[in-house]
Amino acid sequence: MGFNESFVEAVRSGFAQALADESFGPAEYERLTDIEFPDRETLRSYIQAMYDYLFNGAPEQPMPPG
């Protein structure tokens, strides 16, 4: 990644918090990103897949529902 370490850690922390916070759901994500998800399970799967892509070497970037 071409970003400084403090930015990368802030992004990593944000994803980890979203995954750990059971109250974080589609409405909160839509407010932050303007991307809609049909349910919490789909959102959490997407966030985990994006985390894996950014930080765990997953081969391709996941796409949000469209």
Image: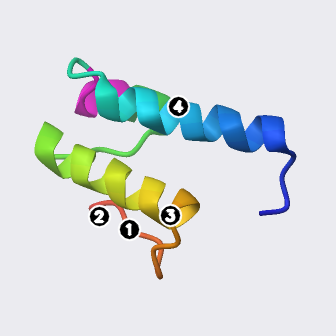
Q: To which residue does mark 2 refer?
A: 66
Q: Are marks 1 and 2 in contact (CB under 8 Å)?
A: yes
Residue at 33 percent across and 35 percent down: it is 19
> Position of 60 compared to 4: left or right?
left
From the viewer's side, name the closer residue of 11 and 42: 11
* Mark 3 or 4, nearer chain start: 4
Q: Main secondary structure of the magenta part?
A: helix
Q: Is residue 41 above or below residue 22?
A: below
Residue depth check, mark 3 versus mark 2: number of the one nearer the observer: 3
Instruction: Give the image location of residue 49, x and y in percent.
Output: 36, 61
Q: To which residue does mark 3 refer?
A: 56
Identify the secondary structure beneath mark 1.
loop
Q: Are marks 1 and 3 in contact (CB under 8 Å)?
A: no
> Position of 34 compared to 27: left or right?
right
Residue interval drawn in magenta: 24-28
What is the distance, in whole Å, between disc 1 and disc 4 at their CAs? Answer: 19 Å
* Mark 1 or 4, nearer chain start: 4
Q: To which residue does mark 4 refer?
A: 14
Identify the secondary structure beneath mark 3.
loop
Identify the secondary structure beneath mark 2.
loop
Q: Is residue 47 above or below residue 40?
A: below
Residue 63 disc label? 1
Q: What type is the residue that disc 2 sits on?
A: Gly
What is the distance, in whole Å, between disc 3 and disc 4 at their CAs? Answer: 15 Å
Residue depth check, mark 4 versus mark 2: number of the one nearer the observer: 4
Q: What type is the residue that disc 4 sits on?
A: Gly
Q: What type is the residue that disc 3 sits on?
A: Asn
